[in-house]
Every structure is written in structure tokens, then in C-alpha cells.
Amino acid sequence: ATSLGLGASQAASGFNFLFGWSEGTTTQVLLVIGITAVALVSVLAGLESGVQRLSQINMTLAAILMLFVIIVGPTVAILTGFVDNLYNYVVNLPALSNPVGREDLNFSQGWTSFYWAWWIAWSPFVGMFIARVSRGRTVREFLISVLLIPSIACVFWMSVFGTAAIEQFLAGAEKVAEVDLSLQLFVMLDGLPWTGITSFVGIILVMVFFITSSDSGSLVIDTISAGGKVEAPVPQRIFWCTFEGLVAIALILGGGLVALQAMAVSAGLPFTLVLLAACVAVIQGLRSEPRVGKTTK
């Protein structure tokens, strides 16, 4: 629900930038309703016919937009920036993860703490969803597909769009850094050719990313509520998907972005203890498994 609200906020900013529409509460609520409706259709269609197909379309559009920015943007700077960013990410990750002795409290609280809490709140849904689609994979395949490749892809994605924006700023386009965070993607695309098309694709991507996220959460909740059944009853699917949208609308009406961020932190903090216990359980489970080449008595 929190993610739906955040997605609606950025999509509303995109429509305001591109078409001049109001980005107020009414627009955000209408966007949540639209996103929830599409997510509901996808969930009812099932994992392969709905969620998987929508995810494939989403990733194709994302790849096309990223390649476009690489080709028409500062190509050399983007590619060299990716190498530098990947190195700096690995080297500075321990220091950036440590809150002790930090002087940049605004950064650590506004980014590290908030996003950690947000991701932790997502972990039960994403974890169970990935476990469902990863059945039959080895631990090595699982780690490569879920941890290594997505991490590199995220660094590459951030490097492409981040470097393009930084190069525009260095060239004198100070507006990129001055506008709100929800608008920076569209302001950066405005400095490239075909801004109308690329900005519209960006809006679609923002919404579809959150639609597929809502789908995975709804499918997991359906499975839990149905006692572990993979195919939950249709009324149950409708209820949980609709309920997510209603909670997002309530948060938007109740306090906007501040309420959404507070909800993410509130949901993530207590579940941290559950995750720590799950980490211990995973280690114990792996140790109890017989190793290849050894037999048990």
C-alpha cells in the first residue's frame, strides 16, 4: 500500500510535468484506483498469463528507455561512470551502512534508514514470491539470480540515469538538481530528444513497476490466506488487491508523502526481528542438509 502511494505520487508529478495536470490528492487517488484495477486484472489472470506477461512488457520498456538514454546521452560518461559507481559501491558499502560517527545524518535517515525499512517491509511478500518462482533451483543459482544480477542491474540503471542527469547539471542545466525528487527523471528526459515520448514511457514504467509489485504482494497474501494453496479463490484475490488500494488511498488522504514514509518505517522496524530470526533459521537449515558426496547414517 505504501509503495502504491509513492508510485502514484511520482506518476502524478509526471503527468503534471508532461500535460500540466494537477498533481494533488485527487489525481493521486485516481491513479491508485487505476493502478489497483490493472493489478486486479493481472492477479485474476494468474502468475503466467498475468503477472509474468506484464513483467516481461515492463522490463522490455525499461530496457528500451535505458538504451535510448545511453545512445543519445553522454555514452562514454555513462559507461565509465558505471565502472566507477560499481567500484565505489563495493568499497563504500560498509561505511555507508554504519550509522556510528556519521555527520551526514540527513542522508542516512532520509535514504539509508527509510529505504532499509521500506525493503524490509517488502521482504515477506517478495521472499515468498521469489521462492515460489524459484522452485527447483540450486542455492548457487538462487543467489546469482536474486542477489548478484539484480544488484549489478540496479547499479547500471542508476548509473545510466544518474550520470545523464549529472552531465546535464555540469553543462549548466541546474534545474535538474533544483526540482523535487519525483520530477527529476522527467526533467532529465526533457534535456534529451523526443522528450514527450520518453517522459510518457517513464510514467508508464513507474505505474507498471508498482503494478507488478502489487501483484506479487497480492499473490503471496492470497496463498497465506488460503492455507498455502497456490491458486486462491477468486473472491479472496479481489479482496486483497482491492484492500491494498484502499489502504494506499487512506494514507494519501491522511497525510500524503509523510504518512506513506511513516507507514513504511513503522512496518519495517518490527519485522527486522523476524528477518534476523529467519537468517538464523536459514543458516541452521543449510547446515543440517547433507553435503554432496557425503552420506548420512
Image (tube, rainbow, N blue to C red):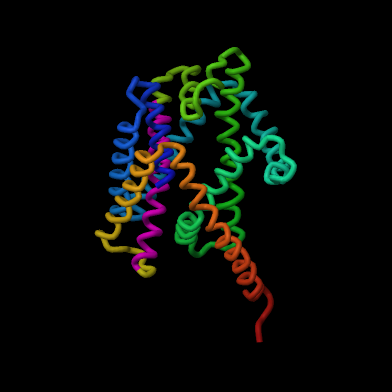
Magenta stretch, residue numbers: 200-226
Res 228 → quadrant: bottom left
63 inside magenta stretch: no
Residue at position x 66%, y 87% from top? 297
- Of the pair 156 and 237, the residue shown nearer to us: 237
In-image side of 61 versus 150 (left or right): left
The quarter holding residue 16 reads top left
Taking the view exactly as shown, the residue that stands out farthest to the front is 254
Q: Main secondary structure of the magenta part?
A: helix
Residue 80 drawn above or below residue 41: above
Q: Residue at x 33, y 40 (%)?
A: 32
Spot occupied by residue 208 in the image (x, y as percentages of width and height): 39, 40
Task: Give x and y (percent) for residue 88.
Answer: 71, 37
Question: Considering only vertical position in the picture, is 137 above or below 145?
Answer: below
Residue 210's place in the image compared with 281, above or below, is above
209 inside magenta stretch = yes
- Residue pushed farthest bottom? 297
